[in-house]
Image: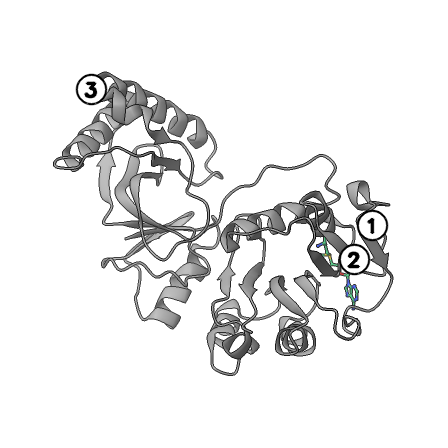
Amino acid sequence: MLLTCQAGFEALLARELTELHGVTPVERGPGWVRLAEGAARPDLAFAHLSLVAPVEVRGDSVNALAARLEEFFLASLRDERIADPWPSVWQGPPELVGLGRRISAVETAFGERLRKKLSRVAKLAVADLPRGTGAATVRGLFVYFADFGRVLVAREAFVHGQRRMADDPLAPSRSYLKVEEAYVVLGREPQAGEAVCDLGAAPGGWSYSAAKHGARVVAVDNGPLKGGALDHPQIEHRREDAFRFAPEAGAGFDWLFCDLVEEPHHVLQHLVTPWLTRGWCRQFVVNLKFGRVDPIALLRELRGPASPLAGSAPGTRIRHLYHDREEFTLVGEVRR
Ligand SMILES: C[S@@+](CC[C@H](N)C(=O)[O-])C[C@H]1O[C@@H](n2cnc3c(N)ncnc32)[C@H](O)[C@@H]1O
């Protein structure tokens, strides 16, 4: 099994695997760790993609790599009939300068070779990750470049849901990308007719995103809204304390958003717990900063029986998003 993550977070992914799942990686590099055994673990926070039973391919040129990958793919197709679109996913740590160009060149050369041999199959390739995070693994082609000449390739992967999102010039902050990515993990986004409460909203990236999807937003923050969130007709700005804010009696929100730069236990105890246990929201996107706590201990607590998630939102997904820094994003639905 090869698990990918944000480059720089492989040590935390390794700790999550060892301390919370009892499996120790056999190798790791920037943006990946490798396990000797192979069961997908859907509830990992730091993993982005889990490639099942990857095969290692080496080559010192674009053509050599493309030829070996084609060989692997054709051999793996024996007895398989491909009639539906299939994901063709090509990745590597973006931090390795020039690797992106190498990946594109090998992907193009592989595509040309495949078109010559199996044009119908080649036409069905979709160069994108499937949306969401399912319960099962996905079949396709998953190619991960550990470096320029070393590639791990698999026909099956578990998709944990993270992905790079497209920016919007009107979004007032980079945080916009996080909440957009969180919708992908949840498999749903705010929509027209829904009400969102955004706690710690300024400068307004998350509020702007919800309004863009058609929802009405109450944006709670003493700081100013900016860019596309400023004076937006669907955003009501309240200069109040997020920890004291509560919906009016009998009027909950469809969504709770919370992105406070605060100690995570404080946010969990004094904000997430009342919102979830009192049914003030139906679903939520909550970001917890782990810069000053041990993230693995925090994960253990979040998944433990005393966590507010255990009773109120047991299906919550905890993810270290592509756009997250030292923080987790929690997405879930409140149990009724
Ligand atoms: C990381 S920023 C939020 C960014 C926002 N999600 C966006 O997309 O632009 C954190 C915000 O929380 C606000 N904040 C911190 N403590 C707060 C509190 N007790 N009540 C309301 N807002 C608070 C800060 O003023 C700051 O604007």
The amino acid beneath tag 1 is: Leu
The residue positioned 59% from the left and 65% from the top of the image is: 290
- Label placed on residue 225: 1
Q: Could you tell me residue 44's position as x and y percent?
A: 41, 62
Vertical order, 14 against 95 (above or below):
below
Q: Residue at x 54, y 74 (%)?
A: 309
Residue 270 figure quarter: bottom right
Colour mapping: one colour
Q: Can you see residue 125?
A: yes
Q: CA distance from mark 3 to mark 1?
A: 55 Å
**Residue 285 place in picture, x, y as percent:** 61, 60
Count of marks overlaid on the render: 3
Give yes or no for contact between labels 3 and 1 (Cβ–Cβ under 8 Å): no
Label 1: state its secondary structure.
loop
Q: Residues within 10 Å of mark 2 (few under 14, many from 20)?
A: many
Query: Residue at image x 73%, y 61%?
Result: 197
Distance, label 2 to label 1, CA atoms, is 9 Å
In the displayed structure, does residue 214 sit left or right of residue 18?
Answer: right
Residue placed under numbered mark 3 in the picture: 117
- Asked if one can make out residue 61 in the rendered structure from this viewpoint, the answer is no
Please state the horizontal and vertical placement of residue 132, each as a whole percent of the image: 46, 50
* First along the sequence among labels 2 and 1: 2
Above or below, 10 against 71 in this view is: below
Q: Amino acid at mark 3?
A: Lys
Label 1 crowding class (10 Å Cα cut-off): few <14, some 14-19, many 20+?
many
Q: Are marks 2 and 3 in contact (CB under 8 Å)?
A: no
Q: Nearer the viewer, residue 305 or 313?
A: 313
Residue 99 in which image quadrant: top left
Residue 97 x %, y %:
48, 32
Q: Which residue is mark 2?
A: 219
Viewer-side residue, 262 vs 216: 216
SS of the residue under disc 2:
strand
